[in-house]
Image: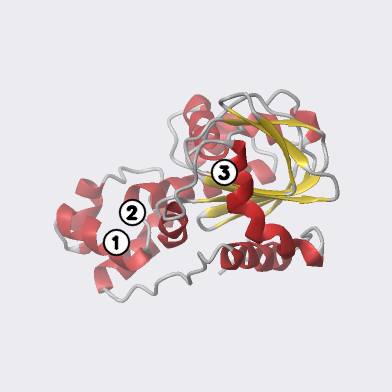
Amino acid sequence: MSRPQEWKGRLFFGPRQLMYAGPAGQTHPHAHHTFQLLLAFGAPVVLRDRHQREAACHAAVVPPDTEHAVVGPVGLAVILHLAPDDIVGRQLRTLGIGDTVEAWQQAGAPLLGCGAGGMPRTWSDAESLAQAMARALQAEAGPPVPSHPAVKKLLRLLPDVLEEDVRVSALAPRVGLSPGRLSHLFGEEVGLPLRPYILWLRLRRAAEHLKHGAPVTQAAHAAGFTDSAHLSHAFRRTFGLTPTEIAGVVEWVLPPPE
């Protein structure tokens, strides 16, 4: 991201999704491992694809691992990142979105009616808008309700062990299942494979510490990352930006305690 100072909006970081709402700054070409749903408020946002084609977009859906860049102008926008491996992400994959800016615009056209309520300010606003955007793309799905005792036990356990060994081979004995059985059950009942679920938990934990002013290294260690470079790589891989590019700039908004 070439001009992080332009990203001065709100960052809503919740379970399996991240939403940014505010001025959309210019970026270097990059790709990240999430679906990116864009909805412009007022002036369109100009996107560029890897073929160097550009288009002014009022709405777009950029698929995972697809190179793109924001080239201007800087205007108000909502950018919603969705995990590609959960239920909603798997539904979005069925759209078969290509790697061109025209394909992103076409896929995003159903989003054009979602912004009538204005820019989100509260967690409730952001949650409602995210649901409306998923619904417009016919990818809405409520989170599964786990029923297996081992999966429910693991979900309670994970937030307390993020700094420990969280490989499935280490977690399986703690809930009384084989690694293979746990992997299968977790994906089936939670709607997201175990490894990316743990990554989201760690990124959220780091975000909580960053929100309260912790240095990036401290936030990384608190979330179970090896060091600040490991956290930065995971953040950029997932969202296309690093913690240092937004720490102290955006306003963090986290979900209310459960």
Q: What type is the residue that disc 2 sits on?
A: Pro
Give the quadrant of residue 235. top right
Q: What type is the residue that disc 1 sits on?
A: Phe
Q: Which residue is mark 1?
A: 186
Question: Tag 2, which secondary structure?
Answer: loop
Where residue 255 appears, x then y in whole percent? 63, 62
How far is the residue under mark 2 from the one under mark 1? Answer: 7 Å
Residue 110, placed above or below residue 246: below
Task: Look at the numbered discs 2 and 1 and tell me whether their residues touch, using CB distance below 8 Å.
Answer: yes
The circle on residue 103 is: 3
Left or right: residue 219 versus residue 165 is right
Circle 3 or circle 1, nearest the eye: 3
Badge 3 crowding class, 10 Å Cα cut-off, few under 14, some 14 to 19, many 20 or more, is some
Give the quadrant of residue 149. bottom left
Q: Which residue is mark 2?
A: 193
Residue located 33% across and 54% down the image:
193
